Image (cartoon, grey):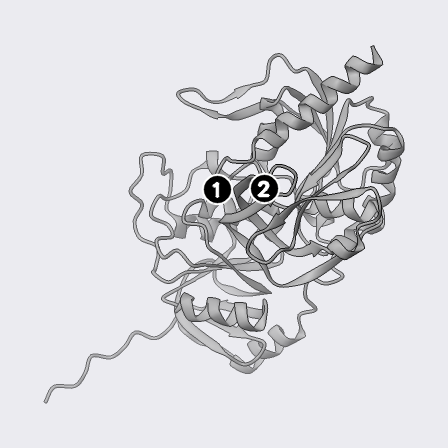
Amino acid sequence: MSAAPAQPRPTACLVLADGTIFYGHGFGATGVTVAELCFNTAMTGYQEIMTDPSYAGQVVTFTFPHIGNVGVNTDDDEAQRAVAEGMVVKWDPTEPSNWRAASELTDWMRQQGRIGIGGVDTRRLTRAIRQLGAPHVALAHDPEGNFDLDDLLARARGWKGLVGLDLARDVTCAQSYRWNEMRWAWPDGYAPQENPVHKVVAIDYGAKKNILRCLASAGCDVTVLPATATAEEVLALNPDGVFLSNGPGDPAATGEYAVPMIRGVLDADLPVFGICLGHQMLALALGAKTVKMNHGHHGANHPVKDRETGKVEITSMNHGFTVDTQTLPEGVLETHVSLFDGSNCGIRLADKPVFSVQYHPEASPGPQDSYYLFERFSAAMAERKAVAG
C-alpha cells in the first residue's frame, strides 16, 4: 500500500483568546497582528471593506468565499491605505477575472502590510463569533510555518480591546482639505462638483471617500476637518451645515473631545447629519449613551425600519457599538431600528434639522436604498437659508 501524500504545512494561523486555533494558508504580508475579530456577510466590496477606516483595530472574516476574484484597483479604495488589520477567507484568493482589475489581492495585501489567511472554516468561525462575541485574536503568517503558539495566545489575551480606545485620532486627516469629487458614473467615472449650492464642514472621524462623494453629488461644497476640530474652528468657516463621519473605536473615548464641538455646533442652530460613529457622537452630545455589542453589525444586507414612514431599507452596516435607546433624552426621537435585533439605527431632534443614522447610506459596498438621506440634509440647508432670507 502506498503512503498517503504529505499534507502541506500551514503557513498561517489564527489564535483566539480562548485558545482555539485555526490553521490555513497565509498570503499578503508576513508577521503577526493582534486585533478584534469580526465577520462581514457582504458578497461584494472586499477592497472597500479593507480600506474602510471604521475597521481599524479589526481583522475581518469574510463569510462569502469568493474573495479576490475581481482583483483590486485604485478607484475602489475608501481611504489612502488599507485600515483593517487583516482578513480571514475560506478559499485562497484566485487570479482575478475583471476588466477593472489593476493587480491581484494577494500582491495588494503584501504592499499594504496586511496579513491574510485562507483555507479556514469561516462558517465555524462565524458561529463562534455570534455565540461568544467578537474575540481578541492573534493572526500570524510565516512561509516556513513556524509558530510560537504560546506567544500568540499571550498576545491575543493581552490585547486591551476596543472598549475605551479612541481610534479616530489614528485615521483622521492631518489637516483640513477641500473635496469636490462626485459619485462614480458611466462613462466618465468620478466627475468634479462644479456648481455646489451649500457649504458643508465634514468632521473626519475616519470618513470614507464615497461618503464625501455623496455629499458633493447632493450639491455640497465640502471642507473636511480633522476629528479634533473645535466648534470655533468649524463655525469660523461659516458653513450651511455640518456632517459627522463614520469612524472606528469606542465612541465614548472619541466623545471626550468630539462632544463639546458638536454641542457648540448645535447651539449655532445649524443642520447636522451624522453617519455611523458620527451618529453615535451626536447621540452622546444630546445626552444618550453607547454600549458595546456582542458581535456588531457588519454586512450589506441589514434590514432597517423607518419608524416614521414604515418603510424598510436594506442597508450596509459596520459597527461594534450602538446607541442605547433607553438613554435617549426627551426631544430626541428614534427614527430607525434594526429588524435583526431591534437596536437603534437612527435619531433626530424633534424641533431642529439634526439627524443621524447608524448605517452607511453611501452604499460602498451595498444597496443604495438610503441615498435620500444626503438629499434630506441638502434640503434642510436650503430651507434654513430660505428662512434666513
The residues tagged by marks 2 and 1 sit, at their Cα atoms, a distance apart of 9 Å
Name the residue at 54% across, 61% down: 38
Which mark, residue 366?
1
| Residue 317 horizontal/vertical position (percent) | 56, 48
Residue for badge 2 = 360
Q: Quadrant of residue 227?
A: top right
Dot 1: few (<14), some (14–19), or many (≥20) neighbours within 10 Å? many
Query: Could you tell me residue 172's position as x and y percent?
Result: 70, 42
Does the CB distance between marks 2 and 1 fall below 8 Å?
yes
Circle 2: element type? loop
What's the residue type where badge 1 is placed? Gly
Pick the quarter of the image with the C terminus. Answer: top right
The structure residue drawn at horizontal position 48% and vertical position 62%, both measured from the top left corner, is 30
- Report the residue at 57% width, 70% height from top: 137
**Can residue 173 be seen?**
no
Front residue (pair 122, 269): 269
Question: Of residues 79 and 298, which is closer to you in this image?
Answer: 298
Residue 177 shows in the view: yes
- Of pointers 2 and 1, the one earlier in the residue sequence: 2
Q: Is residue 28 left or right of residue 377?
A: left
- Horizontally, residue 102 falls left or right of residue 363, namely left
Amino acid beneath label 2: His
Left or right placement of residue 219 versus residue 91 in this view = right
Q: In the image, residue 374 lies at what x, y percent? A: 63, 29
Q: Residue at x 85, y 33 (%)?
A: 265
Above or below, comparing residue 62 to residue 144 in the picture:
above
Would you say 381 lies left or right of 262 here?
Answer: left
Residue closest to the far left: 1
